[in-house]
Each structure stands twice: as structure tokens, then as C-alpha cells.
Image: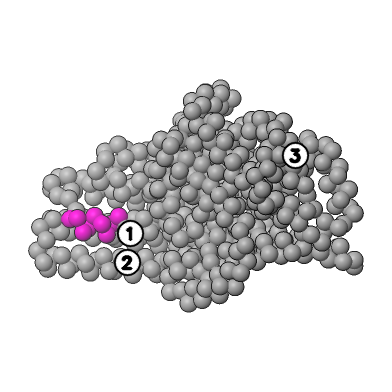
């Protein structure tokens, strides 16, 4: 095996390491904040200016605008994120990722061992999920720094490759082909950050000219919009509008920037920046310019997107199954995939009402929404259960039989959660209204914190149902124990307040304990997702 081939393999390995490090930082950050991240996400995007800032901050932390845009489309599909703030949010996310690239472009490799060691100690020695996920983020950063060092040290050597030289010469003479090439590559790896950092390394080594490097950066920005588009093909109009809006920003920006590549390159060279730094400055400037250009025009862009993806009446009124195709019941693999997607849809509805259930004690409209959504949950649960029972059992193998049982149990638990949230809240509110009582300040604070932990556990359970990841199953069971301990502490604190004759605690004691009981029951249904994964 030639030295050139070995170097190429090392670079590919380094890029994979970079992608894995970015993934570890992202998942660690998401799990660290959990439900609070999603709640803050939905509430902070109240106007376009706040949304830009929040999108930039979130993407910088997650090191992935793609992840943030996909999260945004999820909120949009549930109606929790309006179109204009959502578009502002994705503009901010692209700015945030470019800022992350700027930070990582500095000589940070010397910090790699420290982050890896600290992360390992945190992860192994953690006695709670917060510290474990902080360790995961630290390890991820260490891997990123190590990968960047490997890419940089090998980029100059691979530049001597005749094959790469021919490829770059061909792309340099055909700008549309160069753009298409990088768009496809960025789409494949699902990370514009990793692609931009790789481009920076090639430019720094002299393998790639500055002007062609800037062209590649434009292509990477376009390519970063594709994953969200692909993931929203089966979603409603709200999600599609946001995903395609992001792509429109990128494409219009490219159309404006590409004819100006010559003057932009000359300007950056005249500023005497390091060549690699010039690439990063252009990347940041490109995304900031898009924000400045489109932020005042979001109303017009939104109108275009509404015309491209008009709302359908059935999108808001449909409560019938949408994935349970009868024709697939003779093909177990397809039928199981169909019902798993329907189960995910039911889980999304449960998540909606669980997320807002704490507001139902003070908002009659929220209680009405929960009651209506629970009717949908029970209807879809019934249809999915019937669909499962009609799958041709004579064609099932052992793993398919086990998966059907897992899905059945998951759907059943979702139905129980919907009933607890609906009937339990209605009962508690009715009693409290009748008796003219409310929770004490301390009681409200306890219930709020427990509620957020419950939402976080549910999101973890949903991730586990889709991924069937054994490590995540262990995390969910650990979270169950943590939650049980928190319930016990809250119960003890409530009893102490009763002993102290706290007036509101005395009045609302029965309802307070009922809420804690319902939380415990819901958490048991949530954690049940972990057992089949571990037993299998």
C-alpha cells in the first residue's frame, strides 16, 4: 500500500473522528439541558431578533446548524414555532456554526489531552446524568481537537497526490461542478462545520487555493441545508417551509457571492490575514451578511414559502392514522416500520400535552387542549394496536416478534400516560377549584422541577425507542432512580411543611400528593421502554 493511500486513509479516519466528536458534543449538550433546552427553544423564539441570537448561541454550543434547523422544524411541525421567528432562528443557527468554526480554527490541539482526561474522569466517576453528559461533551471536544491536528498534519502530504491535484484542477476550471461536489459531500457527512474545517486545513497546507477554498465554503453552506429538507419530506407544511426557507437563504447567498469571488479573494489577501484564517473570516462574514440581508425581508420570504407550501385543512383536523398502510401487512418488515412511525407520532402528541401539562392548573384553554389531544392518542393507539394484531404472523422471525411486542408495550404505555395526564389533571383542578385552594410557593417550585425532569425522561425514552441503544437504556433507568429519589424528597419536604403549619400546604395537601403520585406513575410508564432493549 502506497504512502499516499495511507495518508488518505488517515485523513478519512480523522474526518470520521471529527464527526464523532461533534456528535458527542451535540448529544451531550442536548441531554445535559434536556427538556429545559426544548422549552427555552420554544419560548425564546418569540420574535425575530431574539430568535437570531438564540439560534446563534444554540448552534455554537451544539456545533451543528443542521441539528438546530432540524430541531426548529420539529417545533414548527407541532405549531410551537411560528414561521418568521423560525426563519430568523435558522439564520442565527448558521451564524453560530460559523462562529464555532472560527473558535476551532485556532491552534487548540494542545488542549486535546486535557479535555479527554477530564471528560473520562467525569464520565466514569459521574453519579448523575448531568456530570456524565458534561464528561461526554469534554471527550467530544478532545476528539475534535485531536482530529483537527491529524487533518492538518496530513493535508500537506495529500496535496502531493497527482490524483487530488487533477481533481482540484478540474474543479477549479468548473465552478458549478465544484459547488455540486461540495454540496453532495456536505450532505453525505451531515456537517458543514466538519467540511469547512477540512477546507481550512487544505487551504492552510497550500493544497487548495484561497479562491477555490472560498467557493468550497459556499458549497458547504448550501449542502448544510439538504438534511433538513430530506427529513421533512413526510412532515406537514410548517416543517417544510422552514427547511426550504433555510435552503433559499443559502442559494440566494451563493448566487450573490460567487460572481464576487475574485474581488473578495483580493480583499482578503490585501488584509494580510493568514490564508486559513481568510477562509474562516469569509465563512463568518457570509452568514452574517445573509442575516443582515434577509432579516428585514422575512415577511416577504414567509409569504413565498406559504404559497409554495400551502396549509391543508387535513393537516390540522386529521386524527386518523397516516402510516398504517394495509397493503404492507403481508410484509412484516414494512408493517413493523409503519407502526413504529405511527407510534412515534402518538409519542409526539403525548410529548405535546406532557410539556404543557404544568400550565393546565392555571389555564383552562390548556386543559381543553389536553383533553382533545388525549382523544387523539386513544384513537391512534387503538388503530395501531389493531394494525399490529393483523400483521401476518406466519412470516415473522424471532426479532420481528420481539419488536412487535416492544411496540405494543410502548403504545400501551403512551395510552396510559395520556389518560393520567387528562383524567388526573382534570380531577386535581376540579378539586382545587371547588375548594378554592392552590399550591404553596415551595410546592409549585417542587412540582415545576419534577415536571421538567419528567419531560426530559420522556424525550430520552422516545430517543431510546427509535435508536434501541443499550447505553441510553441504562441512562434512562438511572434517570428513573434519580426521579424516584426526587419524588421521595418532595414528599418529605411536603410533610415538613405540613408540620410547620404552612397554610397553603395544609389546604392543598391531598392534591399535591396526588400530583406526585401521577408523576411517579408516568415515570414508570416512561422507563418501561428500557427493559426490552436490555433484555434483547
Q: Tell which tag, 3 or 2, sits nearer the viewer.
A: 3
Instruction: Tell which of 533 and 51 is nearer to you.
Output: 51
State the separation of the CA atoms marked 3 and 2. 53 Å
At 35% from the left and 38% from the top, the residue drawn is 369
Q: Dot 3: within a 10 Å radius of its alpha carbon, few (fewer than 14), some, or many (20 or more) residues?
A: many
Q: Specify the quadrant that holds the C terminus.
A: bottom right
Residue 301: image location, x then y, percent: 54, 26
Q: Tell which tag, 1 or 3, sits nearer the viewer.
A: 3
Q: Quadrant of residue 229?
A: top right
State the separation of the CA atoms marked 1 and 3. 49 Å
Image height check: is 284 above or below 469?
above
At 72% from the left and 61% from the top, the residue drawn is 151
Q: Which residues are magenta?
A: 440-448
Q: Which mark is residue 450?
A: 1
Instruction: Tell which of 500 and 14 is nearer to you.
Output: 14
At 63% from the left and 36% from the top, the residue drawn is 250
Say whether residue 444 is magenta. Answer: yes
Residue 24: image location, x then y, percent: 57, 61
Q: Quadrant of residue 51?
A: top left
State the separation of the CA atoms marked 2 and 1. 7 Å
Q: Is 105 on the left-hand or right-hand side of 503?
A: right
User: What residue sits right under mark 3 in the picture?
Assistant: 179
- Which colouring convention does the figure follow? one colour
User: What residue sits right under mark 2 in the picture?
Assistant: 486
Image height check: is 285 above or below 114?
above
Residue 434: image location, x then y, percent: 15, 45
Amino acid at each position: 500500500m502506497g504512502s499516499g493511500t495511507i495518508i488518505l486513509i488517515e485523513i478519512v479516519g480523522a474526518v470520521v473522528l471529527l464527526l464523532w466528536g461533534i456528535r458527542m458534543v451535540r448529544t451531550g449538550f442536548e441531554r445535559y439541558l434536556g427538556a429545559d433546552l426544548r422549552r427555552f427553544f420554544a419560548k425564546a423564539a418569540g420574535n425575530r431578533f431574539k430568535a437570531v441570537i438564540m439560534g446563534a448561541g444554540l448552534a455554537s454550543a451544539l456545533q451543528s446548524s443542521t441539528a438546530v434547523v432540524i430541531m426548529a422544524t420539529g417545533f414548527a411541525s407541532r405549531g410551537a414555532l411560528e414561521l418568521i421567528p423560525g426563519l430568523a432562528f435558522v439564520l442565527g443557527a448558521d451564524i453560530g456554526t460559523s462562529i464555532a468554526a472560527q473558535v476551532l480554527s485556532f491552534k487548540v490541539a494542545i488542549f486535546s489531552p486535557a479535555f479527554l482526561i477530564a471528560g473520562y474522569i467525569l464520565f466514569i466517576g459521574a453519579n448523575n446524568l448531568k456530570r456524565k453528559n458534561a464528561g461526554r461533551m469534554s471527550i467530544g471536544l478532545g476528539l475534535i481537537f485531536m482530529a483537527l491536528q491529524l487533518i492538518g498534519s496530513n493535508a500537506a502530504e495529500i496535496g502531493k497526490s497527482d490524483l487530488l491535484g487533477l481533481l482540484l484542477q478540474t474543479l477549479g476550471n468548473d465552478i458549478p461542478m465544484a459547488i455540486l461536489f461540495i454540496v453532495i459531500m456536505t450532505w453525505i457527512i451531515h456537517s458543514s462545520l466538519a467540511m469547512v474545517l477540512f477546507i481550512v486545513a487544505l487551504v492552510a497546507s497550500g493544497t487548495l487555493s484561497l479562491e477555490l477554498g472560498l467557493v468550497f465554503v459556499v458549497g458547504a453552506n448550501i449542502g448544510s441545508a439538504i438534511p433538513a429538507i430530506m427529513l421533512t419530506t413526510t412532515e406537514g407544511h410548517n416543517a417544510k417551509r422552514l427547511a426550504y426557507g433555510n435552503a433559499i437563504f443559502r442559494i440566494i447567498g451563493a448566487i450573490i457571492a460567487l460572481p464576487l469571488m475574485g474581488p473578495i479573494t483580493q480583499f482578503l489577501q490585501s488584509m494580510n490575514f493568514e490564508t486559513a484564517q481568510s477562509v474562516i473570516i469569509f465563512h463568518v462574514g457570509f452568514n452574517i451578511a445573509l442575516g443582515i440581508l434577509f432579516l428585514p425581508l422575512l415577511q416577504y420570504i414567509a409569504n413565498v414559502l406559504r404559497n409554495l407550501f400551502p396549509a391543508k385543512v387535513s393537516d390540522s383536523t386529521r386524527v386518523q392514522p397516516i402510516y398504517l398502510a394495509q397493503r404492507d401487512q403481508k410484509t412484516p418488515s414494512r408493517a413493523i416500520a409503519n407502526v413504529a412511525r405511527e407510534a412515534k407520532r402518538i409519542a409526539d402528541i403525548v410529548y405535546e400535552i406532557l410539556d404543557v401539562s404544568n400550565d393546565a392548573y392555571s389555564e383552562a384553554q390548556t386543559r381543553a387542549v389536553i383533553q382533545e389531544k388525549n382523544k387523539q392518542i386513544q384513537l391512534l393507539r387503538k388503530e395501531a394496536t389493531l394494525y399490529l394484531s393483523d400483521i401476518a404472523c406466519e412470516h415473522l422471525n424471532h426479532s420481528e416478534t420481539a419488536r412487535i411486542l416492544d411496540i405494543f408495550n410502548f403504545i400501551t404505555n403512551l395510552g396510559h400516560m395520556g389518560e393520567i395526564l387528562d383524567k388526573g389533571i382534570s380531577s386535581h383542578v376540579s378539586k382545587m377549584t371547588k375548594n378554592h385552594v392552590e399550591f404553596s410557593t415551595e410546592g409549585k417550585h417542587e412540582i415545576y422541577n419534577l415536571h421538567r425532569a419528567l419531560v426530559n425522561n420522556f424525550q430520552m425514552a422516545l430517543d431510546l425507542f427509535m435508536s434501541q441503544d443499550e447505553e441510553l437504556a441504562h441512562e434512562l433507568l438511572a434517570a428513573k432512580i434519580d426521579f424516584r429519589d426526587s419524588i421521595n424528597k418532595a414528599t418529605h419536604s411536603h410533610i415538613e411543611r405540613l408540620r410547620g403549619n404552612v397554610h397553603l400546604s395544609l389546604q392543598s395537601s391531598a392534591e399535591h400528593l396526588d400530583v406526585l403520585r401521577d408523576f411517579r406513575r408516568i415515570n414508570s410508564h416512561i422507563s418501561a421502554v428500557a427493559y426490552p432493549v436490555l433484555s434483547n
